[in-house]
Image (cartoon, coloured by chain):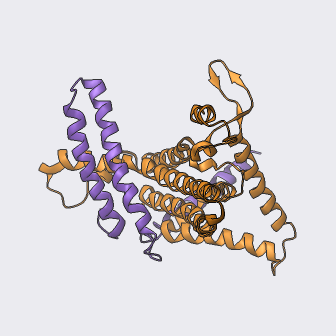
């Protein structure tokens, strides 16, 4: 019984190392490279949802740190910048 | 809805008047309370159960006889399968293959729920933001979990783009964080707004048809075209949700 278990473990180790020696699998390129018209569905909602996310984060920070109007204002502005970033990411393939 | 009660009071001859938003009302069919939580079986739950049952029986029937040369129903099932596999493998490659059941179920559920809402008198489940937000949060938590488990401490480097001088970090990192957190919100709002706006428009044009009498032919034809457009939007929104899930999965697996 004992040597069966060792053989099993050895086989598993061989398979694992063989898998690892195969190297990292090829990383495919991102973004939908077939249909351009689908991008327009995303533009409006990504901009608005970034602003909403910023405002919600600002309200949360205000609630916990008592910085009553400034948190929401600053994070609203940062949210709108993030919205522009989102729109940029929809159209550009490689920009981060 | 008290708007309808008001109309009934003012004009007693307007029987069965419904506002265009009446179709989104959630009615409890089987009440079921646990403590203070209302877990009743509503008409939305009924439509979700029927959607899942429909998808299940479709795939059960289409793959009953697994012929090498497929029958017509099996060909449809294979086309849907190959469609989602192609999307997933194109964006995430081989490493994203274990997540295929989740992506496939997501695609089929949203497609089924959207198309089920086009049936007259059926409830559109995805027009409630609770449902779409749950789906989007499931995707978001999965993506974040995959990223953290796979990359550990390097997960933070996702929020720092390459080639940024170190002084700008306090500005760039919160903005990237907000952009990352806006993903579930954008996923849920896109699906919810498209479905709700489409169905409200259908109902408004239907009301015009009734009010105009004989000239109601024009809104009726417009309603026909709008229904075709809504079916296209239903299928498209399911596709967009799935392809975005695949793109975020690529982000979680590789670019961290």
Query: Which quarter of the picture shows residue A65?
Result: top left
Residue B208 placement (x, y as % from top left): 58, 57
Q: Nearer the viewer, residue B20 or B216?
A: B216
Instruction: Answer with left or right where residue B166 lies relative to residue A16.
Output: left
Which quadrant does the N terminus of chain B fall into?
top right
Residue B120 in the figure: left or right of residue B114 = right
Query: Can you see residue B154?
Result: no
Toward the left, the furthest residue is B167
* Residue B14 in sight in this render: yes
Which residue occupies the foreground of this view, B6 or A27?
Answer: B6
Q: Colour of chain A?
A: purple
Q: Residue at x 65, y 72 (%)?
A: B82
Q: Is residue B49 above or below residue B202?
A: above
Of B5 and B243, the residue lying toward us: B5
* Viewport quadrant of the C terminus of chain B: bottom left
> What tint does the image give chain B?
orange
A94 or B157: nearer the viewer: A94
Farthest residue, direction top: B35
The image quarter containing residue B31 is: top right
Which residue shows up at 79% across the image and 72% down it? B74
Residue A48: image location, x then y, percent = 35, 51
Q: Horizontal and vertical percent for residue B249?
A: 48, 58
């Amino acid at each position: 019984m004992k040597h069966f278990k060792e053989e099993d473990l050895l086989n598993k180790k061989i398979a694992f190392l063989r898998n690892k020696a195969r190297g990292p699998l090829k990383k495919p390129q991102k973004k939908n490279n077939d249909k351009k018209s689908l991008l327009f569905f995303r533009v409006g909602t990504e901009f608005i949802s970034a602003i909403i996310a910023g405002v919600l984060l600002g309200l949360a920070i205000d609630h916990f740190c008592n910085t009553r109007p400034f948190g929401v204002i600053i994070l609203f502005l940062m949210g709108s910048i993030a919205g522009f970033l989102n729109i940029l990411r929809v159209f550009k393939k490689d920009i981060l | 809805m008290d708007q309808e009660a008001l109309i009934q009071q003012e004009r007693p001859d307007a029987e069965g008047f419904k506002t265009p938003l009446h179709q989104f009302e959630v009615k409890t069919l089987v009440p079921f309370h646990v403590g203070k939580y209302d877990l009743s079986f509503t008409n939305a739950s009924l439509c979700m159960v029927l959607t899942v049952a429909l998808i299940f029986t479709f795939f059960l029937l289409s793959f009953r006889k697994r012929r090498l040369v497929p029958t017509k129903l099996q060909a449809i099932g294979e086309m849907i399968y190959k469609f989602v596999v192609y999307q997933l493998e194109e964006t995430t490659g081989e490493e994203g293959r274990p997540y295929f059941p989740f992506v496939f179920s997501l695609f089929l559920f949203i497609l089924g729920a959207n198309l089920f809402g086009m049936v007259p008198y059926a409830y559109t489940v995805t027009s409630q933001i609770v449902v779409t937000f749950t789906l989007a949060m499931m995707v978001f938590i999965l993506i974040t979990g995959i990223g953290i488990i796979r990359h550990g401490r390097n997960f933070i480097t996702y929020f720092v783009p390459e080639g940024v001088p170190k002084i700008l970090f306090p500005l760039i990192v919160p903005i990237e964080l907000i952009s990352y957190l806006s993903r579930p919100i954008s996923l849920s709002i896109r699906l919810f707004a498209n479905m709700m706006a489409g169905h409200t428009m259908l109902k408004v044009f239907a009301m015009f048809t009734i009010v105009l009498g004989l000239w109601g032919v024009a809104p009726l034809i417009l309603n026909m075209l709008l229904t075709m457009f809504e079916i296209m939007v239903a299928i498209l929104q399911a596709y967009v949700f799935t392809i975005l899930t695949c793109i975020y999965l690529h982000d979680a697996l590789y670019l961290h």
